[in-house]
């Protein structure tokens, strides 16, 4: 994951280094990790934190995940002769937690998402082609007498909208009825985007791409004993 500043917390515990990111083993009621996860590469969903916690039997886990989530959306439309052009962009950050390979409740959570659409119907800008006079660009209908501009004399007008935001978001996950022993808690993130403007960004030097990204983050895992049947699944 590259160089990261990490902080690991523990309570009533003996901590032992484990491996992925800020990952440790603990005989504890609680453990946590924090660091910069902006260096994680997301070709697909990827783990951003991994913790090991030891618990007694019939214990439950409260897992709090906090993340800085950044979203950049860029839409650009070009139009002339009142032709409609539409550009769409979406960026999102989804997070879930697995305990020993099983998904914690309530499953996949959307930490951040933005859908952005831009629609334009422009008349266009007059640009007289080489070898054509200005008068030839204007066409008058013999029946109606209405004068219009030949489309070959028009260039597309363009408008673009770029939004870039970052927010800090948190969500509580729950995993119930553990067996005694060590349990691996892994926080997963899926960071992605979709666009429909059809632009070839390789030809635009200063183009700002649509994307989603992460900044700093933390996870806190607490071993508790819930009231019997307190953990309810909601459809």
Image (spheres, grey):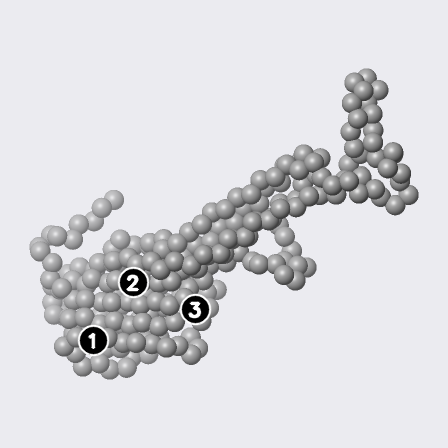
Side of 25 where 87 appears, left or right:
right
- Circle 1 residue: 10
Q: Residue at x 86, y 37 (%)?
A: 134
The answer to which quarter of the image holds residue 13 is bottom left
* Nearest the eye: 37 or 20: 37
Q: Residues within 10 Å of mark 1 (few under 14, many from 20)?
A: many
Mark 3 touches mark 1? (CB < 8 Å): no
Residue 196 visible? The answer is: no
Q: Residue at x 53, y 56 (%)?
A: 210
Residue 191 position, x and y percent, is: 43, 59
The C terminus is located in which quarter? top left
Point out the tag, 3 or 1, that comes first from the N-terminus: 1
Q: Residues within 10 Å of mark 3 (few under 14, many from 20)?
A: some
The answer to which quarter of the image holds residue 51 is bottom left
User: Which residue lies most toward the left here?
Assistant: 228
Label 3 to label 1: alpha-carbon separation: 24 Å
Mark 2 touches mark 1? (CB < 8 Å): no
Image position of 222 with respect to 27: above or below? above
- Circle 3 residue: 38
* Nearest the eye: 234 or 115: 115
Side of 65 where 37 appears, left or right:
right
- Circle 2 residue: 65
Point out the tag, 2 or 1, that comes first from the N-terminus: 1
Q: Residue at x 64, y 36 (%)?
A: 121
Q: Residue at x 65, y 62 (%)?
A: 205
Point out the tag, 2 or 3, that comes first from the N-terminus: 3
Say which element carries label 3. Answer: loop
Label 2 to label 1: alpha-carbon separation: 16 Å
Side of 200 where 186 appears, left or right:
left
* Nearest the eye: 128 or 34: 128
The N terminus is located in which quarter? bottom left
Label 2 to label 3: alpha-carbon separation: 15 Å
């Amino acid at each position: 994951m590259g160089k990261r500043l990490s902080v690991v917390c523990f309570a009533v515990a003996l901590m032992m280094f484990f491996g992925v990111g800020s990952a440790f083993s603990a005989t504890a009621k609680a453990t946590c990790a924090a660091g910069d996860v902006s260096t994680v590469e997301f070709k697909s969903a990827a783990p951003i934190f991994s913790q090991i916690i030891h618990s007694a039997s019939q214990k439950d886990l409260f897992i709090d995940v906090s993340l800085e989530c950044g979203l950049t959306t860029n839409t650009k439309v070009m139009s002339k002769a009142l032709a409609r052009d539409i550009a769409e962009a979406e960026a999102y950050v989804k997070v879930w937690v697995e305990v020993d390979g099983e998904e914690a409740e309530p499953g996949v959570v959307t930490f951040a998402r933005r859908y952005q659409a831009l629609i334009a119907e422009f008349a266009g800008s007059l640009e007289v082609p080489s070898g054509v006079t200005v008068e030839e660009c204007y066409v008058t209908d013999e029946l109606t007498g209405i004068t219009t501009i030949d489309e070959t004399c028009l260039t597309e007008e363009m408008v673009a909208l770029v939004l870039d935001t970052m927010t800090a978001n948190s969500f509580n996950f729950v995993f119930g009825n553990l067996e005694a022993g060590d349990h691996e808690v892994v926080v997963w993130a899926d960071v992605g985007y979709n666009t429909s403007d059809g632009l070839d960004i390789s030809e635009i030097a200063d183009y700002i791409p649509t994307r989603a990204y992460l900044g700093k983050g933390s996870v806190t895992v607490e071993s508790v004993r819930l009231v019997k049947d307190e953990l309810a699944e909601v459809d």
